[in-house]
Amino acid sequence: MEDTFLINRIYNSLNEICKENNIERVKNITFVVGNDSDLNKKNICDYFEQNKSELIGKWTNINMKIENFDNNIAIIHSLEGEDK
């Protein structure tokens, strides 16, 4: 089942990181998630689209690395974006 609370935390964190670093759009991003996480490119893109954010979209290459930890955790491992 999709964890909207986790996606919301990602959304808020990514907005803050991008604002601090003058990033307008995310080109490449890698998340580290737990073994049984439901987080994937589709539900991340959908959430950003529903919130009318242009940080993440069809132009974003999203990679998911799997680690053995709690599924309520997602780590932004790396991020590459376009400046404003």
Image (tube, helix red, strand yellow):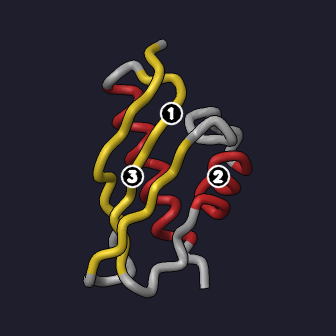
Quadrant of the image occupied by residue 22:
top left
Quadrant of the image occupied by residue 32:
bottom left
Between the residue at mark 3 and the residue at mark 2, the CA separation in whole angstroms equals 14 Å
Estimate the x, y position of residue 84 in percent, counting from the top left: 48, 12
Observer-nearest of 1 and 67 = 67
Which residue type does callout 2 highlight? Cys
Q: Which mark is residue 45?
A: 2
How many labels were placed on the picture?
A: 3
Q: Which mark is residue 18?
A: none
Residue 29 lies, with reference to residue 82, above or below; the image says: below
Q: Residue at x 35, y 79 (%)?
A: 34
Badge 2, how many Cα within 10 Å: few under 14, some, many 20+?
A: many
Q: Which residue is mark 3?
A: 30
- Circle 2: element type: helix
Which residue type does callout 3 highlight? Thr
Which residue type does callout 1 highlight? Lys
Estimate the x, y position of residue 35 in percent, counting from the top left: 38, 84
Badge 1, how many Cα within 10 Å: few under 14, some, many 20+?
A: some
Q: Residue at x 30, y 83 (%)?
A: 70
Residue 27 lies, with reference to residue 49, above or below; the image says: above
- Circle 3: element type: strand
Between the residue at mark 1 and the residue at mark 3, the CA separation in whole angstroms equals 10 Å
Q: Residue at x 54, y 44 (%)?
A: 61
Q: Left of 78 or right of it: where is 10?
A: right
